[in-house]
Image (cartoon, grey):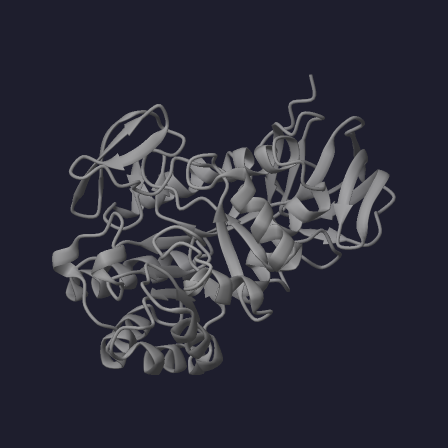
């Protein structure tokens, strides 16, 4: 690509709305407000240009695990998701021994410092055994603030989020600790009551880890965590929009009550994302992927997903009939804001990284740009 390029003729989704026959100016690795006289022009008539997707909860892809893979494996997983439009990804861990998690955090912090990932998310080991999902129950522990601090320190400033069952001993103090250190405290894999969830939010929790999944169902006498998380303006709710984790009515309920500003689409992807069916590992647990659905070999619990965010986008825009502007908020702007990186990514504005996705009229990916370079060269046929 030329040093300066004008992407012209597309329907461009900006923070202010959709611009018909719009244009995005890329100068070097950033979006610019004006084009030099010698800028090249790429005609994208009939296409959409949207911000690059931001995935704040992702365990791997392309056959590679962020929890246990080598550096090369991790980069393979990151690249797999980039091919599907995710230009920013946080690497999520599953439950492991504390020494193992601190060692892995040190490794991944280097990749974060290099800009390959946007930080680290610890999903476990501080979660409720009765809501463990695809986590090894023998490795779970209460969220002792001293242990939480160990993980934060091991990540060397690259810890972005920690998922906790905040009703467990030490949970509220750990939420306060995370908030003090600028790390997102996410409520998830929890058996909390409504009242306990409100207490955690008041202590500083700001995210619901994959809302609905791995928590008590919404009840009319015992509303549980879901009602508290949906009603509070301080909470951003993660949703896995793959058609397996959520019924469409549950997704609609979340959008209705939380609104587009408080929903973040995530993948919760594991190794098989972008790779195919077969046998895999999620941490120490064996997983079988069949027809694109990942389940534990022992017990059959859903074990993450094989989702990529382009599929979540297309499903939201076509099957769920959400406005495209709302989908862009949920898949780019909101997770960038939650992670504290919305000054660089998450929207198409001058000065931000030139991270963008070209979609055709059917919302299929036809091009992916990251920091001004094409990861996927535009296919305009």
Image quarter (top left, top right, bottom left or bottom right) of the N terminus: top right
- Residue at left offset 42%, top offset 58%: 209
Relative to 263, does residue 8 appear above or below in the rendering? Answer: above
Q: Is residue 156 visible?
A: yes
Q: Image check: 315 left or right of 283?
A: right
- Residue at left offset 16%, top offset 56%: 137
Between 255 and 144, the residue placed more toward the observer is 255
The quadrant where residue 356 appears: top right
Number of numbered discs overlaid on the protein picture: 0
Between 99 and 230, the residue placed more toward the observer is 230
- Residue at left offset 36%, top offset 57%: 216
Q: Is residue 346 visible?
A: no
Relative to 186, does residue 257 appear above or below in the rendering? Answer: above
Between 106 and 314, the residue placed more toward the observer is 314
- Residue at left offset 75%, top offset 57%: 350
Q: Report x, y in % for residue 360.
A: 69, 27
Q: Report x, y in % for residue 372.
A: 64, 45
Image quarter (top left, top right, bottom left or bottom right) of the C terminus: top right
Q: Report x, y in % for residue 154.
A: 28, 70
Q: Report x, y in % for residue 68.
A: 23, 48
């Amino acid at each position: 690509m030329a040093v300066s390029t004008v992407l012209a003729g597309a329907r461009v989704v900006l923070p202010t709305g959709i611009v018909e026959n719009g244009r995005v100016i890329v100068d070097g690795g950033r979006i610019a407000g004006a084009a030099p006289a010698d800028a090249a022009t790429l005609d994208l008539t009939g296409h959409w240009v949207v911000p690059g997707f931001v995935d704040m909860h992702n365990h791997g892809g392309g056959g590679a695990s962020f929890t246990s893979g080598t550096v090369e494996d991790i980069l393979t997983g990151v690249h797999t998701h980039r091919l599907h439009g995710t230009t920013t990804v946080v690497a999520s861990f599953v439950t492991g021994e504390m020494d193992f998690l601190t060692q892995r955090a040190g490794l991944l912090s280097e990749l974060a410092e290099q800009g390959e990932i946007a930080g680290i998310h610890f999903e476990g080991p501080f979660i409720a055994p009765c809501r463990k999902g695809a986590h090894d129950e023998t490795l779970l522990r209460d969220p002792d603030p001293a242990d939480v601090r160990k993980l934060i320190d091991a990540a060397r400033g690259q810890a972005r989020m920690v998922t906790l069952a905040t009703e467990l001993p030490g949970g509220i103090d750990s939420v306060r600790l995370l908030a003090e250190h600028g790390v997102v405290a996410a409520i998830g894999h929890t058996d909390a009551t409504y009242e306990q969830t409100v207490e955690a939010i008041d202590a500083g929790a700001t995210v619901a880890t994959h809302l609905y999944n791995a928590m008590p169902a919404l009840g009319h006498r015992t509303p549980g965590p879901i009602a508290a998380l949906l009603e509070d303006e301080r909470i951003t709710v993660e949703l896995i929009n793959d058609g397996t984790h959520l019924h469409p009515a549950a997704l609609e309920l979340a959008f209705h009550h939380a609104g587009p500003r408080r929903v973040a689409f995530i993948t919760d992807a594991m190794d098989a994302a972008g790779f195919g069916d077969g046998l895999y590992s999620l941490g120490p647990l064996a997983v079988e992927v069949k027809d694109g659905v990942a389940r534990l070999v022992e017990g059959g619990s859903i074990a993450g997903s094989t989702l990529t965010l382009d599929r979540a986008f297309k499903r939201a825009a076509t099957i769920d009939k959400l406005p495209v502007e709302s989908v862009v908020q949920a898949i780019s702007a909101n997770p960038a804001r939650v992670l504290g990186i919305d000054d660089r990514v998450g929207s198409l504005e001058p000065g931000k990284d030139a991270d963008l996705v070209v979609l055709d009229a059917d919302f299929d990916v036809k091009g992916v740009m990251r920091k001004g370079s094409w990861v996927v060269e535009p296919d305009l046929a």
